[in-house]
Image (cartoon, rainbow, N blue to C red):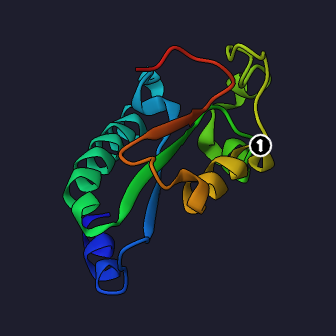
Amino acid sequence: MNWITKDALRHLGPGSTIINSTSVQGYNPSPMIINYASTKFAINGFTKALAQDLAPRGIRVNAVAPGPVWTPLQVSDGQPTEKLNGFGDSSWLGRTSQPVEQAPAYVFLASPESSFVVGEVINVNGGANVP
């Protein structure tokens, strides 16, 4: 993320946005995917630090943290086979989301309507206690 961001900055001016993808795992990690959850903790911190660094240049940095989402990853070793049947049941809505339910958060962060939103992680997770 660091290197691609450094390369992208040459092309970004005031009014630009960077939107990172993280996960609810960055707040509530599952023991079976410690390596994945650790990267999400790092993305949360990277987002907040980069936001502070780039805000004076007029570049906003935020992130979206999806909760359980049905993607091809889930059935190709993203979840153990025995967990697929109940995947997402622990969300407050009692289900997984579809990618289309995640997209509006990204669109909002890319739009002028979010011009005063910086250094935030929008949690689209079906309900979970996160900081």
The x and y percentages for residue 58 are: 32, 66
Horizontally, residue 69 falls left or right of residue 67, namely: right
Quadrant of the snapshot with the C terminus: top left
Which SS class for mark 1?
Answer: helix
Asked if 66 appears above or below 16 in the picture, the reply is: above
Horizontally, residue 128 falls left or right of residue 21, namely: right
The x and y percentages for residue 2 are: 25, 65
> Visible in this render: residue 33?
no
Q: Which amino acid, mark 1? A: Glu
> Visible in this render: residue 43?
yes
According to the picture, the residue beneath numbered tag 1 turns out to be 101
Asked if 111 appears above or below 5 in the picture, the reply is: above
The x and y percentages for residue 113 are: 60, 54
Count the labels in the image: 1
Task: Give the camera-side residue of 124 and 88.
Answer: 124
Horizontally, residue 119 falls left or right of residue 28, namely: left
Quadrant of the snapshot with the N terminus: bottom left
Q: Residue sitting at 70 percent across and 13 percent down?
A: 92
Q: Residue sitting at 46 percent across and 26 percent down?
A: 32
Q: Residue sitting at 51 percent across and 31 percent down?
A: 24
Q: Residue sitting at 60 percent across and 61 percent down?
A: 111
The x and y percentages for residue 70 are: 75, 41
Task: Give the camera-side residue of 122 and 24.
Answer: 122
Tell me where residue 9 sits by quadrant: bottom left
In this view, the residue farthest toward the bottom is 11
User: Label 1 crowding class (10 Å Cα cut-off): few <14, some 14-19, many 20+?
Assistant: few
Task: Give the camera-side residue of 62 and 98.
Answer: 62
Tell me where residue 44 sits by quadrant: top left
